[in-house]
Amino acid sequence: ELKVEQNPLFLSMQEGKNYTIYCNYSTTSDRLYWYRQDPGKSLESLFVLLSNGAVKQEGRLMASLDTKARLSTLHITAAVHDLSATYFCAVMKTSYDKVIFGPGTSLSVIP
Amino acid sequence: DTGVSQDPRHKITKRGQNVTFRCDPISEHNRLYWYRQTLGQGPEFLTYFQNEAQLEKSRLLSDRFSAERPKGSFSTLEIQRTEQGDSAMYLCASSLSWFPDTQYFGPGTRLTVL
């Protein structure tokens, strides 16, 4: 059974600092997604990663994928308050299968 | 607005009543997913459709839950004989079945069972 774990579950960081969120999954997968969710809101797609070594960047966020280690990272550079949200990684095992979400990382960026 | 829409946004019901939620996906998307999310948790997969065919249903979904997608367009999720444990946010998402198959989520329906 496909399981997705995230670390840490809660993260409080100061503005201007860098940090990394980790996502581990238990079996091989075809797709890995990162989503953002603001309190009381729905999920917003950030990145989709397909292949080993894939790296995508958008603003202060950079996501990478190591399929051999079954690990994805979401790196935050020079955090700002607007990045405060919950970040989910999600994994699809095949292109015809369901998507399994991790538990989420709740990020608070403190001035 | 051409995004995913859900109706109603909020539903309060008494235990034992039946409720039905509607989801309208992005028009060109042939896949439609239903998830349930409780506070502090990630979305939990319930079921998904490709066109009008229901391809998978979670083992966690009891017989009180049923979903349909007639004609491969909008979808409905019905919960019969609601229980307090059904209180959650019910999210709908749609996607293409080919790359990029990113799921786009609707605003959700928050269900409260009293």
Image (tube, coloured by chain):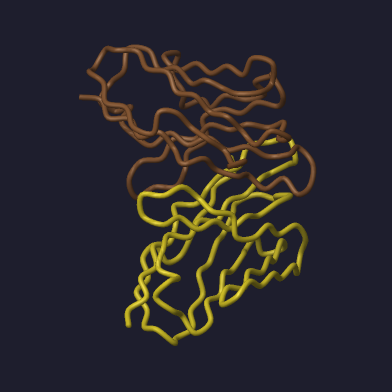
Rendered residue at 34%/50% (across/down): B40
Residue B101 lies, in percent from the top left, at 72, 45
Q: Quadrant of residue B63?
A: top left
> In the picture, which chain is yellow?
A
Q: Where in the figure is residue A21, as x and y percent of width and height?
A: 50, 69
**Residue situated in front as seen by the camera: B92 or B85:** B92
Point out residue B56 in the picture as x, y percentages from the top left corner: 62, 25
In the rendered image, the quadrant that contains the N terminus of chain B is top right
Number of numbered callouts drawn: 0
Which residue of the protein is positioned furthest toward the front in this rendering?
A: B1
**Residue appearing at x 46%, y 27% in the figure:** B60
Q: Quadrant of the C terminus of chain B?
A: top left
Judging from the image, what is the letter of the chain drawn in brown?
B
B29 w.r.t. A18: above or below: above
Q: Name the residue: 61% across, 28% down.
A: B48
Q: Would you say A12 lies left or right of A58 here? A: left
As drawn, B23 above or below B63:
below
Q: For residue A44, which quarter of the picture?
A: bottom right
Q: Residue furthest bottom?
A: A16
